[in-house]
Image (spheres, grey):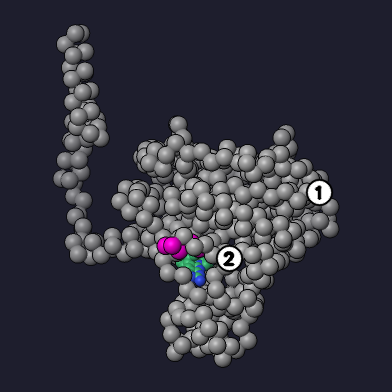
Amino acid sequence: MGLATVAVYSDADRAALHVLHADEAYRLGPAPATESYLRGDLILEIARRAGADALHPGYGFLSENADFAEACAAAGVTFIGPPASAMRTMGSKTRARQAADAAGMPRVPGSVTGLVSVEDAIRVAGEIGYPVMLKAAAGGGGKGMRAVASPEELAAAYAAASSEAERSFGSGEVYLEKLIERPRHIEIQLMADEHGACLYLGERECSVQRRHQKVIEEAPSAVVSESLRQRMGEAAVRLALSAGYVNAGTMEFLVDAADNFYFLEMNTRLQVEHPVTELVTGLDLVHMQLRVAMGEPLELKQEDVRLRGHALECRIYAEDPENQFFPSPGLITRLVQPGGPGIREDCGVYEGWTVPLDYDPMLSKLVAFGETREQAIDRMLRALDEYAIGGIKTNLGLFRRILQDADFRAARIDTGYLERLLAAADQAEADSPQETEITEEIVAIAAAYFAASSRGAAAPANEEQQSKWAVAGRREGLRA
Ligand code: MV4
């Protein structure tokens, strides 16, 4: 588009990759986000100094902050995102549930206003039936959430959820939902313009997660039929239009074993996992966001949106899988990045960069595309083999385990899948601990083996292939 870019950075990010890429960069303040990336006033002061026409809020930080969107408008800077009013409607889960009802969108049974007392909670839970889930109206991402199996547990859970919500979000408002067992987490990507058009751009399967952090996302979902996609997509478009939504957004759903779908909440920003949607739709979502923000109408019609192939994203983090996925920031001493057919890497780091401990330690998003889910998985495994990150601990090894797991390959996944896989691995380790000491002798044997195997043919994946190549090689050798 030929647009110049202006980056902002905190002291911890002085040499971050986004700063090196931008045309200009300005310091915000010290590392803590409250003194830098959450300072809307400083950000808008820089926008004014730099002469920026528009601002992309990215993910996290102020990206879903309606007051900030309004402050941008007041400063004459176009906020690349939805109107503040739509952000406010969706920011309150109870208001979003009321909007869902008004738009005929299926949602999880339960209350659509905050609970006023324990007695109120007991009454509502009795109506919808146990087990139930208490949730924070201002929440999202699992904070202030409590599953409750019986009326006896409800009073304590209500007090705990409400005080956690108060501490985390400054509002103790909680509401009740029926608990959906072993759900899948599936979300619909939307893009709306200022002229009343709204498209659904297919779904993403986000069930592979740990502690409410997504680990692998894919598009399309292996279990969503064309008919389910259309029903979810059309319901999502109806709700978005009724909320006055504009720009990119995502509606999250729980889908149960019988393919019932229930609206959960809406994310009023572009999401980390948007590349998998880009690969299967062939669309550039950020480009569309910019054009929509310039007031242009969407050129596409819904029937022009076609899904092709399959895409997966692995979220690569600086964390230690051997130590409860504890963050592992530090100096990246070596970085070998994969490439080739069907591989896209959206990376935020470089060799020689020190991953700061101040923020979420996501390093990179490795994305694989294939004509089929199986090809996308195999390409991802090949890319993971090529990938090397030195100096820090990463979760790269975890993806190999998941992508080789029979349940994952058969798409038998729900939101509890990864936690079960990790628990099974921990159990196997406890049953037969692998604590072989790496002695000098073992190192010598490994070195000798490596030298011997790399002199001959490298061990190929399958023996039949090996013999064919070996035969061809011997024939060439004899000819020479
Ligand atoms: C639920 C649920 C089951 N029943 N609501 C977790 C985060 C928040 N956004 C919604 N979450 C859930 N809500 C009802 N009524 C199960 C979850 C849930 C979950 C949802 C999406 C992705 C991963 C999850 C992991 C555990 C629980």
- Could you tell me if the residues under marks 1 and 2 are in contact, i.e. CB atoms within 8 Å? no
Question: Which disc is residue 106 wearing?
Answer: 2
In the picture, the quarter occupied by the N terminus is top right
- List the single residue furthest toward the top: 480
287 shown above or below 211: above
Amino acid at the residue labelled 1: Arg
Q: Residue at x 59, y 53 (%)?
A: 233
Whether residue 325 is visible, yes or no, is no
At numbered mark 1, what does the secondary structure look like: helix, strand or loop?
A: helix
| Helix, strand or loop at mark 2 | loop
Foreground of the two, 42 or 162: 162
**Does the stretch in magenta take in 255?**
yes
Q: Could you tell me which residue is drawn at 18 percent across and 36 percent down?
A: 449
- Total of numbered circles in the picture? 2
Identify residue for label 1. Answer: 49
Q: Which of 452 and 468 is in front in this view?
A: 468
Mark 1 / mark 2, whichever is N-terminal? 1
Q: Give 89 or 473, whichever is nearer the viewer.
A: 89
Q: Is residue 304 left or right of residue 159?
A: right
The answer as to whether callout 1 falls within 8 Å of ligand 1 is no
Q: Is residue 95 left or right of residue 417?
A: right
Q: Does the magenta stretch include residue 416?
A: no
Q: Give the range drawn in magenta.
A: 254-258
Give the x, y percent position of residue 323.
36, 62
Dot 2 amino acid type: Pro
Magenta residues: mostly which secondary structure?
loop
Where residue 387 appears, x then y in whole percent? 40, 40
Q: Position of residue 256 (x, y in %)?
A: 45, 63
CA–CA distance between discs 1 and 2? 47 Å
